[in-house]
Amino acid sequence: MHDIVKAYDGLPWLVKLILALPGIDGIAWGLYRVFKGLSKKDNVLVIIGILWIFLGIFILWIIDMVSIILYKKLVWLA
């Protein structure tokens, strides 16, 4: 799991931005949160990641998009 999180963190900024587009975001960054939670043994982050997979498609993608544009990485709820 740690390798997957490291791979996501190592992606170029433009690829991260593309993964934050509506529809893609829920799956891509939701899985990132689940894997990060599993690697850190953080159950709250795993639950947030699972919720993100379903809700990220509709509205939560905006949070990821702003985070990536401003900080070039996920900052909030990650």
Image (cartoon, rainbow, N blue to C red):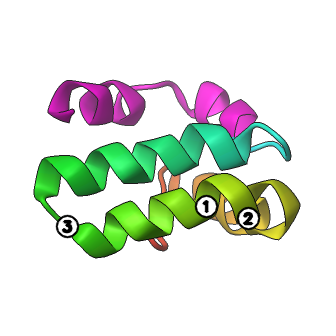
Secondary-structure class at tag 3: loop
**Residue at image x 60%, y 35%?**
16
The stretch drawn in magenta includes residue 15? yes
Residue bounds of the magenta highlight? 1-19
Q: In this rendering, does residue 30 appear at all? A: yes
Q: Which mark is residue 52?
A: 1
Q: x and y percent of residue 21 in the render? A: 81, 42
Q: Are marks 3 and 1 in contact (CB under 8 Å)?
A: no
Q: CA distance from mark 2 to mark 1?
A: 5 Å
Horizontal arrangement in the rendering, residue 38 relative to residue 76 (left or right): left
Relative to 33, say whether 12 is above or below.
above
Q: Are marks 2 and 3 in contact (CB under 8 Å)?
A: no
Q: Amino acid at mark 1?
A: Trp
**Residue at image x 47%, y 69%?**
48
Q: x and y percent of residue 30 in the render? A: 54, 50
Crowding around mark 3 (Cα neighbors within 10 Å: few <14, some 14 to 19, many 20+) is few
| Residue under numbered circle 3 | 42
In which quadrant will I find the N terminus? top left
Which is nearer the N-term, disc 3 or disc 1?
Answer: 3
Q: Amino acid at mark 2?
A: Leu
Secondary-structure class at tag 1: helix
**Residue at image x 51%, y 58%?**
50
Q: CA distance from mark 2 to mark 3?
A: 20 Å
Secondary-structure class at tag 2: helix
Q: Are marks 2 and 1 in contact (CB under 8 Å)?
A: yes
Q: Which mark is residue 55?
A: 2
Horizontal arrangement in the rendering, residue 17 relative to residue 9 (left or right): right
Which is the main secondary structure of the residues drawn in magenta? helix
Q: CA distance from mark 3 to mark 1?
A: 15 Å
Q: x and y percent of residue 26 in the render? A: 69, 49
Crowding around mark 1 (Cα neighbors within 10 Å: few <14, some 14 to 19, many 20+) is many
